[in-house]
Image: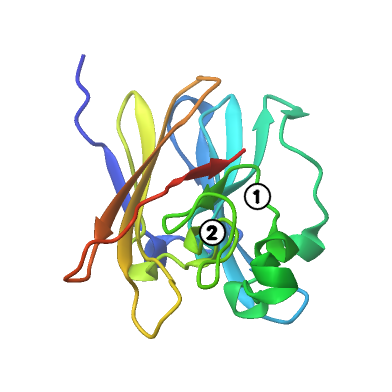
């Protein structure tokens, strides 16, 4: 079977609120969401013809909500928790401010720390509060699957990011699942811990 790429789009080529048809009944659409403090975020909706999910670019490319056919299978979470990273103080509440913006069905944890905060690191790290680089976001598809990719300089706790993350989210047409792959790179000259995962 021919599996050569048949389509490729950058984020800049997607028009907000104008769905783009993909093979096998799939589609992609872009919505600009404004949080309760007035900051804008990019939310992509991707459908493979059966499974539909959203990806929030400013939130570490977290998978926001998930539907299987007509049934929502992710939790019901009030949109007041869908916040731009600029409006979340990760150090709040004894370094547990991460929870104040906990919206996504699949939220990035780490890469600095998976769980308990310490004097420097906040609960669950900064990955879920690190925006993807808009110019790096690319959607591609072939006759079998859809792939969304993007690069994220992980926010970290200092003036410059310590990690760079590349995210790939892949789903096959008509499938009931998706595959998310995160590749984390240390961008400093010293050894760094990597404690990476997801809150599902």
* Count of marks overlaid on the render: 2
Q: Secondary structure at mark 2?
A: helix
In which image quadrant can residue 129 be found? bottom right
Q: CA distance from mark 1 to mark 2?
A: 9 Å
Residue 120 position, x and y percent, is 50, 72
Marks 1/2 in contact by CB < 8 Å: the verdict is: yes
Q: Residue at x 63, y 75 (%)?
A: 91
In which image quadrant can residue 117 be found? bottom right
Q: Secondary structure at mark 1?
A: loop
- Neighbour class for label 1 at 10 Å: few (<14), some, many (≥20)? many
Q: Is residue 89 above or below residue 139?
A: below
Which mark is on residue 104?
1
Identify which residue, 42 or 122, lies in the foreground: 122
In the image, taking residue 136 as reference, residue 109 lies left or right, namely right
In the current view of this chain or complex, which residue is farthest to the top? 1
Q: Is the image coloured rainbow, by chain, by secondary structure, or in one colour? A: rainbow
Which of discs 1 and 2 lies nearer the camera? The answer is 2
- Neighbour class for label 2 at 10 Å: few (<14), some, many (≥20)? many
In the image, taking residue 60 as reference, residue 4 lies left or right, namely left
Which mark is on residue 128?
2
Residue 133 position, x and y percent, is 37, 69
Identify which residue, 112 or 187, lies in the foreground: 112
* Label located before the other in sequence (1 or 2): 1
In the current view of this chain or complex, which residue is farthest to the front? 119
Q: Residue at x 78, y 59 (%)?
A: 79
Which mark is on residue 57?
none
In the current view of this chain or complex, which residue is farthest to the left? 189
Residue 186 position, x and y percent, is 24, 61
């Amino acid at each position: 079977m021919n599996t050569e790429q048949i389509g490729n789009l950058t984020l800049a080529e997607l028009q907000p609120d104008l769905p783009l048809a993909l093979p096998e009944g799939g589609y992609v659409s872009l919505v600009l969401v404004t949080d309760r403090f007035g900051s804008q975020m990019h939310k992509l909706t991707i459908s493979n013809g059966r499974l539909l999910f959203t990806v929030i670019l400013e939130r570490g490319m977290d998978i926001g909500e998930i539907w299987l056919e007509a049934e929502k299978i992710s939790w019901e979470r009030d949109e007041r928790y869908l916040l731009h990273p600029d409006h979340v103080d990760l150090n709040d509440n004894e370094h547990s401010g991460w929870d104040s913006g906990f919206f996504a069905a699949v939220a990035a944890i780490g890469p600095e720390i998976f769980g308990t905060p310490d004097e420097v690191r906040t609960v669950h790290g900064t990955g879920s509060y690190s925006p993807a680089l808009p110019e790096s976001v690319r959607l591609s598809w072939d006759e079998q699957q859809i792939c969304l990719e993007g690069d994220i300089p992980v926010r970290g706790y200092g003036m410059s990011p310590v990690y760079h993350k590349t995210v790939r989210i892949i789903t096959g047409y008509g499938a009931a699942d998706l595959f998310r792959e995160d590749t984390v790179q240390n961008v400093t000259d010293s050894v760094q811990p990597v404690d990476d995962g997801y809150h599902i």
